[in-house]
Image: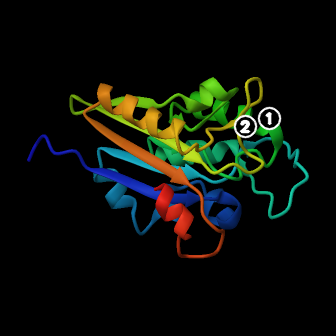
Amino acid sequence: MGNDIKITILGDICPQYARNSFDMNKPESVFNNVLNLLKTSDLNIANLESPAIEMPSPIKKTGPVLSSKEEDIKLLRDSHISVLSLANNHINDHGAKGILKTIEACIDNKIHYVGAGENLDAAQKPLIINVKNKKIGIISFAESEYNVAGKTKPGANPYDPLESYDDVRELSIDCDYTIVIFHGGIEHYEYPSPLLKKRC
């Protein structure tokens, strides 16, 4: 029992839609219903659904442009979230600058991140952390929209039905446990499409 690892995985976090709660700058104002769960978990993972920026630099796109503040990252860390997945369809909403600022805010606040980077190689790099003497591998993918990284372009780790499978298999060799995070599907539609189910 003492060696059991308790992991909590949260869904999308978008401070823009909970600005009043985040501006209170208290974990209980944002996570009041689950804060005790987060405090007692060994590892908490969440998807940050918006870049953390100082100044807006929105790209031209269809759909909403989301954003968060750099201090939101600190609040997430203080709420016992230890890993942020950045592979999602909104990470590039403020362009390369927004992605790099988000990564910088994660590093400055000592919170792990996975699924995005300054280029494709960095974005594809999985995260391996030790929890209770076990190696936990985390890899995060996003469906390709306006968001994916390129050879010299910051962005999210794109899902590829062939290469991504190999990436997961390779990570699993090196770890005791592997967590795969996939961000995709049809926005505001609660059911996965047949194609998405097949991919997963």
Residue located 72% across and 31% down the image: 100
Is there CB contact under 8 Å for labels 1 and 2? yes
Q: Which residue is mark 1?
A: 96
Q: Amino acid at mark 2?
A: Ile
User: Coloured how?
Assistant: rainbow
Residue 27 at x, y percent in the picture: 49, 56
User: Residue 86 appears in which quarter of the rendering?
Assistant: top right
Residue located 33% across and 60% down the image: 36
Instruction: Report how far apart the C-alphas of labels 1 and 2 lie in the structure.
Output: 5 Å
Residue 132 at x, y percent in the picture: 21, 33
Q: Secondary structure at mark 2?
A: helix
Between residue 150 and residue 33, name the one nearer to us. Answer: 150
Between residue 128 and residue 21, name the one nearer to us. Answer: 128
Q: Which residue is mark 2?
A: 99
Q: Secondary structure at mark 1?
A: helix
User: With respect to residue 137, does 26 lie above or below?
Assistant: below
Q: Is residue 80 visible in this depiction of the protein?
A: no
User: With respect to residue 119, does 67 lie above or below?
Assistant: below
Horizontal side of residue 23 vs 160, given as left or right:
right
Between residue 31 and residue 138, name the one nearer to us. Answer: 138
Residue 178 at x, y percent in the picture: 34, 40
Horizontal side of residue 193 vs 187, given as left or right:
left
User: With respect to residue 18, does 65 lie above or below?
Assistant: above
The furthest residue to the right: 60
Q: Amino acid at mark 1?
A: Ala
